Amino acid sequence: MQKTKSFRTVLKLLFLEGALANAYVTWIGPTYLSGLAGELGASIHVVTLMISLPWVGSIGQILGIYLFEKNISVKKSTLFFAVFSRSIWLVILLLALGLGVRSLRWGIYFPAAIFSSLFGSLGDVTWLTWVRGLVRSGFQGRFWGVRQTYVMATLIGANLIAAAVVPWKPNGFYFGYAMIGILAVLCAFLSLFLLLQIPDIKIKKHPELLVPSSSVFDSIKEILKQKNYRNLLIFFALFNGMIQMVGPYFPYYFTKELKISMSQVAFWAMLANAGYFFTAGYWGKKIDQTGSPLSVLF
């Protein structure tokens, strides 16, 4: 009985942590940064760099393989990299508050975005491994479905808050954007506090999480030998490529070219989140019932 209660407690912590972490990512993500850039009259070249440079840091996901070969604690690794990744945004926020948004050069943002992404992607790899070791097989579909429901409920609230506050510009100071920046950093560190409460796992007790090899390059070769995995890589490369080619530019286009309020854009984002909120739990159960995530994805 104690084990069940303990497992439920861990699940609740993971759900709440996911909700807070995604609120943080949303508020400091391309949607609001792109909208702010449009309101400030930044050029399309600046926005393109702002959107694309963080992806350079995603190379950290490959570097994460080193951590597994050294059998380093996934909990400690996740927390270590997340603290570095999120602290960078705290520094940027303090600079923006101290110097003013218009005085803060975009050049300061670019290296910050790359290094934040680098540390963040390293932490994402260890976090995913950590969660897979915590959540038993046969329950993972429901876990991700419920977690996504928590996340979407939070994002609906996050976008409603943003819609209400981003128009605040007393004396030309972008107080509304500063407010969601403060809330983002607060959520970021609250989610880290929740992660501290979650138990670690031992990699050696989960051989399914490892790829036997003698080096990182051998690990990559072993993974790429799997046809299904190669197909998945191609699918997500194409899918995410299409999204990133268009999606992040919408807020910039609406605010700069059409002069539409960012609060209205945030309201539209909230409506999109509502669709995910009502369907995530159903699809999670469907995955566990069918045992075929691929068929559900299709």
Image: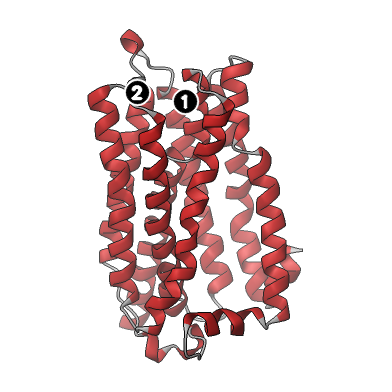
Do callouts 2 and 1 mark residues in contact (Cβ within 8 Å)?
yes
Quarter of the figure with residue 164: top left
Q: Which mark is residue 36?
A: 1
Q: Is residue 179 left or right of residue 269?
A: left
Q: Tag 2: residue type?
A: Val
The residue at the point 22 percent across, 26 percent down is 98
Q: Badge 2 local density, few (<14 within 10 Å), some, or many (20+)?
A: many
Tell me the element at label 2: loop
Residue 221 placement: quadrant: bottom right
Residue 1 shows in this picture: no
Upstream in sequence: badge 2 or badge 1: 1
Q: Residue 40 location in percent, x, y?
A: 46, 19
Could you tell whether 170 is left or right of 266 in the image? left
Residue 264 visible to an observer of this rendering: yes
Q: Is residue 187 above or below residue 194?
A: above
Badge 1 local density, few (<14 within 10 Å), some, or many (20+)? many
x then y, percent, for residue 85: 34, 53
- At x 44%, y 88%, the residue is 206
Question: Dot 2 corresponds to which residue?
Answer: 101
Classify the position of the N terminus by image quarter.
bottom left
- Taking the image as shown, residue 167 lies to the left or right of residue 294, namely left
Q: Secondary structure at mark 1?
A: helix
Residue 47 in the image: x percent, y percent? 54, 32
Q: Which residue is painted at 65% across and 62% down in the image?
A: 283
Q: Nearer the viewer, residue 73 or 176?
A: 73
Left or right: residue 41 compared with residue 239: left
Q: Quadrant of the C terminus?
A: bottom right
Q: Is residue 6 above or below residue 243?
A: below
Q: Nearer the viewer, residue 115 or 133?
A: 115
Direction top: furthest residue:
171
